[in-house]
């Protein structure tokens, strides 16, 4: 089985621990981005995964490529140019103080991607699954066109397509998002969204799904999923359900929706180490489950367990093995020392 | 609007994370002290603030001055000499293990301050508010005299005066504290205290205000405030109310008392990053509210929200903006990532 | 009073914070091992303690010796050779992700210990107590023989002997453990075990003592202790009771059993900094209590308070003073700053 | 006396020590840029200096402003917008391996500066000296126009103008540089250049001034300076002379040229800690000398001593006091401990 | 072109900077070993390289594999078992204090390698070059047998074979070394040695080749090479020539010997950052030159330039590109900043 | 053999690498002081050594005691009180920039030492050698009196006494130094001084011994030693001879003077890692040589080799073994890796 993901990988610069920006003269530096995070997770589970993007030729761009190789992700289809590397600055929140992300991703190499640059024929050879997120088309209308090109080509190759909506208000308005995303949806088989995305991108809501109310309403999200399926014909919809108590404590669960049935996962209480990449680790888990023929219940359980573990790990990437996810799926959440 | 604070700024030396003293051969080094912390907070909220003290001429003393400048605090009235810089060693506690402070502040430059050294006429020109804490007069009888000199001069300039009682048992006995502090109180308009100070310094208590009992009694503190007002004629009294569950978890709220009414803030559950400077961040919030004509309820809400955020930040200084405090005041304590 | 402990001290290599192995190119390096940890604790409480082992002559072995000296532990009876130093790699878990220990301790100097190498006559001169754990005989049949030699000698010197069962499944099977440990038990006066050990090593269980059920059953453990005493004739049995909520949160208490009575300690809710060495810190506390003639209730209270503090401290060693343990025993678990 | 400098300040990201990019997952982070470096140096010598630029509003931009404040540089005329902060990645070379700089400065806030945005009337009030480098006009034709606007305004205010040529081949070609820089030269009183700039920007060379030959020819540089003065009418020309033995060892000296006389400084052998900002520290020294009425010999001696010290200091900024420079000028280069 | 190397990769644990072992409680952790270092260098130059070894299955072993992948080295033929990872502790010397290496490599997975475990047929498919060092057969007679098996198989595949003598006195005596190495030499085409190896392993010396005399004698080494060729029939011999002035300063050059002619490289003066892996980086350079049909002079110049750069880089691996080596070969050793 | 030293041990706070004070918000923290450094060196060579001082009871004072224990120094005679710990801030110089020391040692526990506090009878039991430096009597007239008390007692016990003059201009004037030191000299057998001390403390100079001239004159120092012996009757005089080229490079040698003969050591060229404690490491070497009956030439060679190594080691303490010093004495200064 082989999966391809397409999008941006950024340099992530974060002060250490809970320090505020420039409280010390240093940044922890790593790499991350929605689709790259998914490729890394899948490779960690033993799936052949490839990540497609454009990066600058210089040493920092090459370091991103090397990092993906370290995790076994295929990087052969990454294009190189002389533009820049997208960056995001991340300050980790604590207690009532929220985490903060500053994006410096405009003018990046991938944001300069053009139609016909990527050899989708070659990229999709022998591939079973293609994944992208709503961030990629948001990088610019040129990148949105490249997405469409990829999707058409994927369908030609009979590849299953998943999309994680991932609405980012600093990249585009809800209006533009809707206009760009709706036409892409016809190529999507599996939709993944968090508790806010459907409302923001498609205006689809239901009673009790206003996130600010603090309490999440399962039935409401079932209804949201039903509307999504009815409107776009998705085979499956996954919705992650985050209850934010404070920056350190969240409750985390999800719903799979398929054949008009909703499957809810167990809910985990999280002591958060790093919540960035939490949604991506869920998406990778969901893809893994569906690819491997898991039932919908098994899939949502696996995906939530995988992303539960991600919240305990520094960095965008979900550095866990299949064995570790399965241990949690099987119910051991006591965190007892493994000797 | 311009605020002046007067007191000591110390070098703060702390092992990293939860390590015990000298568990590694390094200290994180920063600066802090009750009145300096207030000056920094106010400058962060856009108020012109100046800090008055004495420091050694050498590079470490100059680094303290530079640090204050970094936060926009006016340092022009800081005197320099050849004495030493006060130091405090801080070990951060966790769970049932308390944090530990070792003071090495005797013989400092500010502890050698003398009458007539400071040009209060010039310092108080155009100033609206003067703030000091009970630590400053505790540095020595000479410094207590300088405080009195400052207070008299402040009143001459019709400046509002606030005092945070901040009793420190290692600096003086409750008897000496009472003897020195009582005469200073006649110049004070706004008194700030924590749940223990009034009892320690003035012997004023009420039923249910014994801290050790674990449960705080709101009515008791109302009564304490009423006694304080009645005895010293303060315009306003603020009392912070800390419930210590363990070194990582506290509940935090406060009461404003004015015109014989008590106003209680919301209570926050804190996951503590660093609690040193928590009281100072409250004082700064209270000063900010009163200076800006907030109602008493608004003031205590603002001050508690500001100090709630402080507990999530490393170091003495409350590195938050007005906007961040207001976001919490408006009710978002979920800590969701801000992108 | 003087205590001797005998066993292995290892190099402990751990990534910083909650990072996974090799997430950064660095390890925090310290030393630890069941019996060494006990010797350090006792020295911290003012008891003369000596640690007996074999270590390589090279600089890393010498650094282990120097570290013990730093804590005042007598190292004069440590033998040196040219084998290797045992190592364990530790990754700290968080939330639902468990901590992980990789042992690289085979072929160490102590695992090459031989009969008649140690001068037990000299080692036990003036000694009141001898302590070892189930890990030492598990290092090899040669080391088990050395243990037996030590135990016989200890009894000859009328020394009280304690043993912490400490079953390690990666060192030996439950069958071998039973075969080796049973004959050693006749020399043991005080047995210490955690909630799993008795079942693993001796097959002794009782209703409600299956750890996986999550809820611990006090009466069950009383019964386990009674069976242990009845079978091996121990004077006292201590059982620690850990409830693992997740990797960050545990509940911690213990039971002393003596003269057919069970004494239960207070139960503490732990916010864990580092739980490795938790059992050893309890053992040291229990030894301290018995050595000093504490009642059984006092002893178990002291030992649980001591080990509660250990969970707030990085590293194997329990870096707390007698005064600090006593403060917690006396009931202050609020973690308020000590100035 | 008051000096204004105008240009870009960038975020500087450098691996620690001599590590290659991403050899570890961290960057040391600081700020620097030709004109900002000059402003900091002058403030360190007690001159009032102001730095004019545009920066993004976000926290990283604000941290740059705060850092300048820390050094006492006036930041009131810095404009804020929503573009990005220029970045440069720096890898420190050693022995035969050269240092490497990767610029990521395109699309920055200052590169988006427009005519009439800066209030030069207000900026130049009471100002004695204006300094810029050849990097600023290289940021874009719009910025070159802003430079011209500033220069005209400076002349109107009878302000002395200095320019450090600072040719950067990655920003523009020698042809474009010449075309843009020549018209600006008529406003320049004091020209500062390194041993390559005059050739690269103006095509002015002389025998023995080919840098690659390894040996620098004093008479050749005298001739270059004479040609510069003759062509552009500068009052003074300063040329720094760097002999690069390897990345750790350089020889460093300079020449002042004025009234048709050349003044050569002492030559220092440098053990380099960080050579970035070396030229800027020289420029600041030259400005300081001329501003204070030093003779040309005194000026070049001061400027070379100042920049010699810079090479021993990490970061772009020359963190030395006037007293420290003067000690070196007076001949003590033994580096004996000062207690 | 494809190269295979076979040997051990170890965990390298080094205190930071020039600190002595355990001067702080931390180690920098990386990976290295003669043959792995060569594989990494060649991959950095664009050659397909594969590294063959055995490693433990656990996370530390897997981290070594991931690190090799990061550099593009093929790891598919690495076998996994449950033994341990070899370790070496490295303390960096300075001035008159030598660097110190403590090996803890006994009982490693590779030291447990057995005949017929490796599938040499598959490993050598399409391979042009096989490289090993004298360290591999020194790991044990079993590993020496595996070497012989590999060499025979390599010859069957008409693969060029290189061997770097790399005598390690702590692994075997000169007698054993000779006994084991001589029979392997008949399969070797290209021999690489440092200024001591030929004497230690084969007893081949010549006048002026006693290293302790401090001055190296070129003619002597020519004679040594002639004897080696005459005795073993090597096609080419390379000898590196290190003059150690102190731990920070060495002179570095080398000689190629082929067809009875000696070719001497330029000599570089090194300011050393890390000299471990210096010989391996030379070997990789020599292999690269011969593989690419460079003349002997070109090859030795390339190999010395490559290894000169290695001395400026932390860690065993030579993190330089082909372009960087070529820049030095072409003569630029000034270390000027590259912007 | 047993040696006692008496003086101050301070907390040493130093920024990392070559950073200036507060360039980052951290200090490396260690301990050091002239006499403590000597005690550590001697313990490292296998001599029983004890250090006598007063320290504060708090955790930082206790950490100093623990650190001495780690090196095997006897700490039983250290007195504890509630004063403070002396501190020195150290900034490491580079190239032409000198290292800088800021002392914050006034009011320390040892500076508050009183006559009759120390039990010299017990301290000197079984002791062969007593060592102090000129820093100790400079701490205050009370401490000078304690020194005299110690010296008289030492003589009563027929203990050899050495004194390292160690003049510190920030502690006292040359006049006071002379007045206090002269009467102490009658108890001193072995005097140790650097190239400046004799002139500063006793006004004894000779032609060519003005340090500033850069070139040291051996005959001059011989004459200085002869004058010292003649005036005070010392049995032996040692003078260290430092030629400071810059902060990174020094030449280092010494002279022993005894029975009217001068013995000069080899001169070493130092690449300096940390020069603080260099003189103390020499003193310890000289004491070691004399104690062990080395000839004067052997003693000065040993002492200079020992202190040469110290310059390659971070921190005040000379972390070298007897074996390491002897290797250098025997002539290997090439710094070749020891495997």
Image: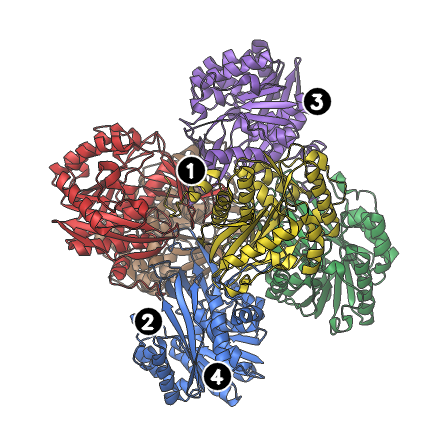
Chain colours: A yellow, B blue, C red, D green, E purple, F brown
Q: Which residue is mark 3?
A: E294
Q: Quadrant of residue C84?
A: top left
Q: Which residue is mark 2?
A: B215
Label 4 in the same subunit as label 1: no
Q: Nearer the viewer, residue A306 or B234?
A: A306
Q: Is residue A301 left or right of residue F126?
A: right
Q: Give the mark toward the camera: 4 or 1.
A: 4
Q: Nearer the viewer, residue D208 or C306?
A: C306
Which element type, helix, strand or loop, lies under badge 3? loop
Q: CA distance from mark 2 to mark 4?
A: 32 Å
Q: CA distance from mark 2 to mark 1?
A: 71 Å
Q: Is residue F185 visible?
A: no
Q: Give the mark toward the camera: 2 or 3.
A: 2
Q: Is residue E98 left or right of residue A181?
A: left
Q: Nearer the viewer, residue C34 or F207?
A: C34
Q: Which residue is mark 1?
A: F301
Q: CA distance from mark 4 to mark 1?
A: 69 Å
Picture coordinates of residue D243 (x, y %)?
Answer: 70, 44
Q: Nearer the viewer, residue A256 or F73?
A: A256
Q: Which residue is mark 4?
A: B161
Label 2 in the same subunit as label 3: no
């Amino acid at each position: 089985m082989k999966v391809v993901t397409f999008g941006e990988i950024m340099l992530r610069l974060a002060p250490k621990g809970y320090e505020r920006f420039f409280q010390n003269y240093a940044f922890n530096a790593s790499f991350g981005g929605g689709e790259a995070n998914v490729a890394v997770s899948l490779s960690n589970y033993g799936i052949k995964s490839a990540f497609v993007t454009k990066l600058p030729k210089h040493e920092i761009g090459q370091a991103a490529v090397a990092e993906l190789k370290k995790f076994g992700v295929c990087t052969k289809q990454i294009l190189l140019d002389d533009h820049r590397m997208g960056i995001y600055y991340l300050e980790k929140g604590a207690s009532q103080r929220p985490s903060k992300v500053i994006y410096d991703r405009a003018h990046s190499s991938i944001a300069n991607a053009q139609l016909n640059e990527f050899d989708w024929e070659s990229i999709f050879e022998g591939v079973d699954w293609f994944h992208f997120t709503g961030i990629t088309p948001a990088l610019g209308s040129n990148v949105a066109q490249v997405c469409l090109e990829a999707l058409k080509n994927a369908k030609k190759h009979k590849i299953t397509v998943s999309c994680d909506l991932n609405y980012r208000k600093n990249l585009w308005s809800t209006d533009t998002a809707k206009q760009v995303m709706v036409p892409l949806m016809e190529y999507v088989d599996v939709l993944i969204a968090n508790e806010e995305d459907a409302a923001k991108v498609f205006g689809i809501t239901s009673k009790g799904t206003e996130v600010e109310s603090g309490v999440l309403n399962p039935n409401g999200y079932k209804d949201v999923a039903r509307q999504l399926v009815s409107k776009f014909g998705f085979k499956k919809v996954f919705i992650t359900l985050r209850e934010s108590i404070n920056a350190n404590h969240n409750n985390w669960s999800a719903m799979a929706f398929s054949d008009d049935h909703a499957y809810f996962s167990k809910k985990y209480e999280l002591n958060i180490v790093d919540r960035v990449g939490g949604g991506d680790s869920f998406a990778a888990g969901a893809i893994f489950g569906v690819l491997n023929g898991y039932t919908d219940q098994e899939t949502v359980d696996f995906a939530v367990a995988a992303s539960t573990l991600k919240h305990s790990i520094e960095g965008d990437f979900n550095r866990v093995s299949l064995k570790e996810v399965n241990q949690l799926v099987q119910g051991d959440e006591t965190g007892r020392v493994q000797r």
